[in-house]
Image (spheres, rainbow, N blue to C red):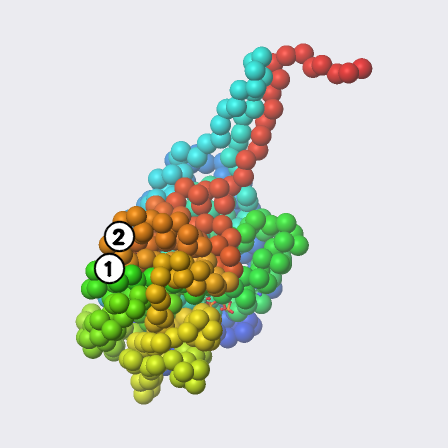
Amino acid sequence: MNFQPKASHFIDGQYVEDESGTPIEVIYPATGELIAKLHSATPQILEKALQSAQAAQKSWAALTGTERGRVLRRAADMIRAQNYDLSVIETHDTGKPIQETTVADANSGADALEYFGGLAGSLTGEHIPLGRGDFVYTIREALGLCVGIGAWNYPTLIACWKAAPALACGNTMVFKPSELTPLSVLKIAEILIEAGLPSGVFNVVQGYGDVGATLVTDPRVAKVSLTGSAATGRKVYAAAAAGMKHVTMELGGKSPLIIFDDADLDNAVSGAILGNFFSSGQVCSNGTRVFVQRGIKAAFLNRLKERLTTVQIGDPMDSKTNFGPLVSKRQLDIVESYIAKGIVEGARLVSGGKSLPGPGFYMEPTVFADVRDEMTIAIEEIFGPVMSVLDFESEEEVIVRANATDFGLAAGVFTNNLVRAHRVASKLQAGSCYINTYNMAPVEAPFGGSKLSGVGRENSKLAINHFSEMKSVYVSMNDVEAPY
Ligand code: NDP
């Protein structure tokens, strides 16, 4: 398959190139091979994208919600029909196994387009009676030109999670994917146009952080939705604040997963595997601090080790492979340095810990036991396949320790005690809490973080409020009373 796109950017309904932009080399993480060459957006390209999105916004917003929704739902159907081809691109962009990408990526993007496409026709304001016949009515208005900036772990999903609610509300978007994974979102832009989206409503520009920063500060931009690290989030939020822009920040995490000794052992081990090793650990909501109650610790570690012997690491395009490489050499180096720190700081390596000889950026699924709260691997987000297992005695103790983090994206609890499950969930400081499961993100439910993990929510009806605002129109049916 040829992964070289027709051009780097997709603006005003067509591919556009400007070869004077900084080169972007797309590397297949499984082999280290160069699979495509693109260029970062120049100021001229950015101007074209912003102008096109601004010009298209009013007429897009003037359609009925049903008309907008129809386009999004048609795109969802087309994405599903092309799921395999899109998954092959996603696998080559990210290195994630085809076994995962055919299930999680384009499909989840299609879900978002279908869901928000379905909601678009029902977006309304309300009527508020004030007495004596006076009233207020509210008009739900689009924000205008929105910018989406994506991370590299779920390029298709992130683009669709941002574009679908934005477009449903009548906004237009300029989207910048991570320069590590620039390919799949170009295909999404193509499909949207084929589905009937007017030119300029969804545009893609490539580039490094500086391109994102330029977009965020442009005065024409009304809203910025970022998926990225907390460090980038801080910069983007501050830059957006200068222009009083709306923001949604989906940032990192160091989420706790609490396993009580009355939990179903195999389910708890499955939850810990799903919460640490899916996408080779490159998932923001991962439960990387696995608190295991002392009574079940030995059994948990034994079962986990046993289960990890069946992992199929290898060629991501082989349908039997369920564990692929990390996204880049740089990410592999970061993960290796955390593993070295874990060993130096006294954590006990019980599984994995080694990278595989190249080519490709593979790291074994790694488990540390006897991890203490103050160790670096228990504090910082690693964004790789490294699980830290920590011991605990009591419910009170584990809640305090689970919440003792600057992040608040997700949290999980495994127990067969119904009352305890809900009590613990109510006390955990996190945007998503899982009981006897982990890492679900259906479009129907709000997703996002508290504390340093972010601001706002994606998915669900709540996302509509983050891509629209209300205008109140006050109507008097009576004479106006003035004091003089
Ligand atoms: P980064 O924060 O490094 O980058 C995110 C995006 O922001 C990239 O497109 C990046 O471009 C861009 N960017 C960087 N600097 C700026 C700037 N000053 N202004 C505007 N844009 C900028 O994250 P990664 O791509 O490394 O992704 C990993 C991080 O994303 C992890 O922390 C992870 O937890 C988080 N994440 C959060 C999710 C959530 O929903 N909460 C989901 C997935 C990931 P460039 O790549 O060129 O630097």
Q: What secondary structure is found at the residue carrying circle 1?
A: loop
Q: Which residue is mark 2?
A: 417
The 10 Å Cα crowd at callout 1, few under 14, some 14 to 19, many 20 or more, is: few
Q: Are marks 1 and 2 in contact (CB under 8 Å)?
A: yes
Q: Amino acid at mark 2?
A: Asn
- Marks 1 and 2 sit apart, C-alpha to C-alpha, by 7 Å
Q: What secondary structure is found at the residue carrying circle 2?
A: loop
Question: Is 92 placed left or right of 298 in the picture?
Answer: right
Q: Position of residue 150 (x, y in %)?
A: 46, 61
Question: Is 239 placed left or right of 413 in the picture?
Answer: right
Q: Position of residue 159 (x, y in %)?
A: 42, 56
The quadrant the C terminus occupies is top right
Q: Is mark 2 within 8 Å of ligand 1?
A: no
Closer-to-camera residue (329/230)? 230
Residue at 20% x, 64% y is: 266
Q: Position of residue 456 (x, y in %)?
A: 49, 50
Closer-to-camera residue (283/211)? 283
Compared with residue 57, is residue 207 higher up or lower down, i.e. above or below? below
Closer-to-camera residue (471/205)? 471
Q: Is residue 171 visible?
A: yes
Residue at 63% x, 12% y is: 478
The quadrant the N terminus occupies is bottom left
Residue 364 found in image quarter: bottom left
The 10 Å Cα crowd at callout 2, few under 14, some 14 to 19, many 20 or more, is: few
Question: Is 319 placed left or right of 293 in the picture?
Answer: left
Residue at 62% x, 58% y is: 238
Numbered badge on residue 338:
none
Closer-to-camera residue (258/400)? 400
Residue 235 found in image quarter: bottom right
Residue at 54% x, 52% y is: 247
Q: Which residue is mark 1?
A: 262
